[in-house]
Image (spheres, grey):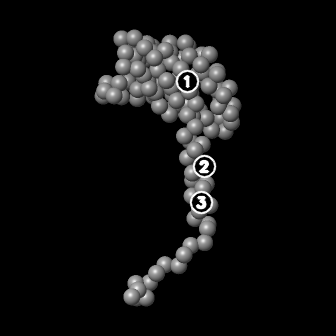
Amino acid sequence: MSRRIDRVNELLRREISTVIQHDYEWHGKMVTVSAVEVTDDLKEGRVWIGVIGGSAEPIIEKLNKAHGSIQKAVMKRVVLKSTPVLRFKHDNSAIRGVEIVNLLEEVDKLPKAPLEDEDTKL
């Protein structure tokens, strides 16, 4: 991926996040924009959304239904040759991360083998 596309992805991530946080109410859920991936021709973009505190399906549906107004708000602030059509996808990496931390805490509670002392080695 080119540096330009990387910069566009990051810029869009920040701007989409701002629009989603300021223009929409999430009723006790935490909604974040994890990443944005636009195609090389800037025609399409996938927006990865993380949701904590509830089901992600209704939020993803709401965002996909409102993608036109979100695109319009973002493109008022970001000037690009062509406006990518945004599609919102669920990013469950935050949930997986919490599950991994919980598993590591469980493993830490398991009995451990005693450490060998260097003096007792032959």
Residue 14: which numbered mark, if any? Answer: none
Q: What's the amino acid at mark 2?
A: Glu
Nearest the camera: 56 or 12?
56
**Residue at label 3?**
105
Quarter the C terminus occupies: bottom left
| Real-space Cα separation, disc 3 to disc 2, in angstroms | 10 Å
Q: Quadrant of residue 61?
A: top right
* Callout 3: SS: helix
Identify the mark at residue 88; answer none if there is no mark: 1
Total marks in image:
3
Determine the secondary structure under disc 2: helix
Q: Which residue is mark 2?
A: 99
Mark 3 surroundings: few (<14), some (14-19) or many (≥20) residues within 10 A:
few
Quadrant of residue 117 within the rendered picture: bottom left
- Which quarter of the rendering shows the N terminus? top left
Q: Amino acid at mark 3?
A: Glu
Q: Earlier in the sequence, mark 3 or mark 1?
A: 1
Question: Is the residue under label 2 in contact with that under label 1 (CB below 8 Å)?
Answer: no
